[in-house]
Amino acid sequence: MDQDALDVLRSAVERSKRHSTVQLPIDFVRDPSEGDTPLHQIGSDGRGQGLRLKLYLSMVMLATKEPRQLRPYPASAYATMLSIPDPAGQGARRVNQAQRWLRDAGFIQRVENGTHPPHVTILPLPELGDWGGRWITLPLDLWSNGWIHVMSGRALSIYVVLRELTGGRPDGSAADGRRKRQYCLSDETWARGAKDLQEIGLLRVMRIVDATDPFARRQPRLKYELTDDLMADLPGPARRRS
């Protein structure tokens, strides 16, 4: 793991003044009408590293107060924080491209500031369902211990979805076909993202049979159990995913 990137990540968390979690609206990952979701839109960037998603979530982590406007950080700072190669050159250009995509897609407001870093504001997401005041929470250790560095883009997408699916239940949860369709992620993304999470130690997947309905076909389903307690430590010798 890049120690400089980890130090910058920890500095960013400290600057945010957050103490426990980062909250996301459930609308970010789930649409009851089975339409497209912000997570799917942002995460489908054609790159295994998932730069757009990592950048967006990191900006949400930093934007703690209304109107959720960020300090004008340079693109190279974000590139260093996310451990993107050549942060002062190509890395910064990739961050700027990702921010402009997020702006054009309506997720952020980005106001250019001449030769200075742009002013960025996180915009509210459309409300897709009535979730009874529930939120998705992401642990700060995702950043402060560098787990965001070792996750592939698809692993991060599945991780955020599973934080909503399991709702903090330590014994995990299964997702039927309709629930999966509400997340708008392909079977390939589910399978490969879950495999990536298993490889870095953050997920256990079990095959179960639901016997609660005696008239239903007893078809095995996958049950997902996050092992978030491991995030209290640095990632092990897992290679950086791509």
Image: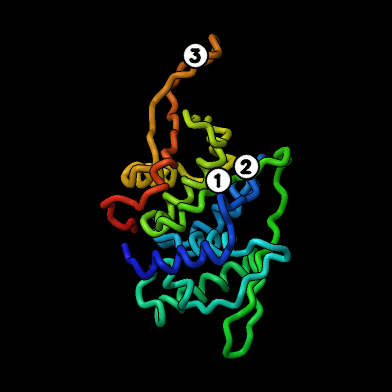
Pinpoint residue 154: horizontal percent, then vertical percent: 43, 51
Pinpoint residue 27: horizontal percent, then vertical percent: 65, 48
Nearer the camera: disc 1 or disc 3: 3
Q: Which residue in the protein does label 3 denote? A: 211
Within 10 Å of disc 2 (Cα), the crowding (few <14, some 14-19, many 20+) is: some
User: How far is mark 1 from mark 2, CA to CA?
Assistant: 7 Å
Q: Which residue in the protein does label 1 denote? A: 184
Asked if residue 62 is positioned above or below residue 119 in the image, the reply reads above
SS for tag 2? loop
Task: Please tell me which of labels 1 and 2 falls first in the chain.
Answer: 2
Which of 103/91 is in front?
A: 91
Task: Please tell me which of labels 2 and 3 falls first in the chain.
Answer: 2
User: How far is mark 2 from mark 3, CA to CA?
Assistant: 27 Å
Q: Quadrant of residue 9?
A: bottom left
Which residue lies at the image location 48% right of the left edge and 71% below the top edge? 78
Asked if residue 226 is positioned above or below residue 57 in the image, the reply reads above
Pinpoint residue 29: horizontal percent, then vertical percent: 59, 47
- Type of amino acid at the residue the image marks with label 3: Ala
In the displayed image of the protein, which residue is found farthest to the bottom? 115
Task: Please tell me which of labels 1 and 3 falls first in the chain.
Answer: 1
Which of 235/214 is in front?
A: 235
Which of 27/167 is in front?
A: 167
Q: Which residue in the protein does label 2 denote? A: 34
